[in-house]
Amino acid sequence: MNTETEITEIVAAELSGDRAARIGRDAARIEELAYYGFEGRVYEVFEIELYQEVQPIVLGMIRKGSLARLAQQHCAHQGRKFFVHPDDMRLLKSSSDARDTIMVDVLTAAMRKLHRDLKKGCGWRADHNGPRGASCLTSYFITLCVWMFRRAYVKWAQDRVKWARLHAVYDFTEGAANEAGIGGLLGSTSYEVDAEVFGTNFEEILDEQAPETQAVVRLTITGFVDTEIADQLNLTHGAVRTRKTRFRTALYEAASEGRIWIPKELHARAGSRQQAKGVAA
């Protein structure tokens, strides 16, 4: 079964009514939209209605893996390499957030493509003669979604990799509680937790600090030791330690304000350090 035939059958299973009647309505709608130059409020309503109709279909195809499979078939037919990792397929099947992210990008790109095609007078035609005869506008649009899946998937997969790298640096997880990363910054070398610790506000709090403090912190969580940071930034070792202390203070203040979450064990360690300083004084 080729891609066009399978898409036609998927759409037919999702939509009710006679196919010929639907194609006739689509032709009349396109003629109306052409009268307005495929612009204005009439076209906006058309896009909204089309989006609402195809959204559940596309989400279902992403969940079942058929959209990825058809996209790979399409790319292979064009001589283009495209591979969807099995781990990603499992995540798309289980995660509604992941499906929504790709679905939005796919539909947005397909809508733009459809708009360009209609304004050029090409794209869907009521007299198109496919393997199963003429297909409705919805089937044609789902075909565009198949074409757009590759780019949306690659972007999503790259963003996941970027997040994972950021997570490894900024999150205090079981594998990151060591001299590098957040554990080193907060002075902890053995405490371990299984869940995410710092939210996305970490970067926001860091951006509020002085440029030198930002540089010290970024090098610290990347794994550089104080002596290396001092050499790179042309600072004294004392200045590096001071900058780290200031940022730790800013983090704990942010935690007390509810802007970021830090485990109570690390709060306790911070309190112990402060008490020790007081005793020494």
Image (cartoon, grey):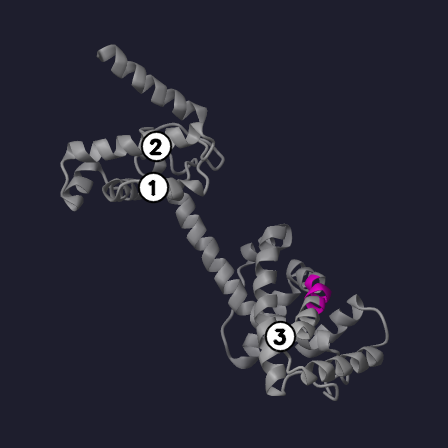
- Residue range (magenta): 49-55
Q: As drawn, is 237 to the left or to the right of 100?
A: left
Q: Earlier in the sequence, mark 3 or mark 2?
A: 3
The residue closer to the viewer here, 3 or 218, is: 218
Q: As drawn, is 117 to the left or to the right of 162?
A: right
The label number, if any, that marks residue 250 in the structure image: 2
Is residue 83 visible to us here?
A: no
SS for dot 2: helix
Indicate the quadrant where residue 41 lies: bottom right
Q: As drawn, is 137 to the left or to the right of 39?
A: right
Indicate the quadrant where residue 19 lies: bottom right
Query: To which residue does mark 3 refer?
Result: 144
Amino acid type, label 1: Glu
Residue 169, image x, y percentages? 37, 43
Is residue 190 visible to us here?
A: yes
Q: Residue at x 25, y 41 (%)?
A: 216
The residue closer to the viewer here, 28 or 152, is: 28
Q: Residue at x 48, y 34 (%)?
A: 194
Residue 266, image x, y percentages? 39, 25
| Vertical comparison of 51 with 178: above or below | below
Query: To which residue does mark 1 refer?
Result: 208
Disc 1 to disc 2: CB gap under 8 Å = yes
Look at the image and tell me in which quarter the N terminus lies: bottom right
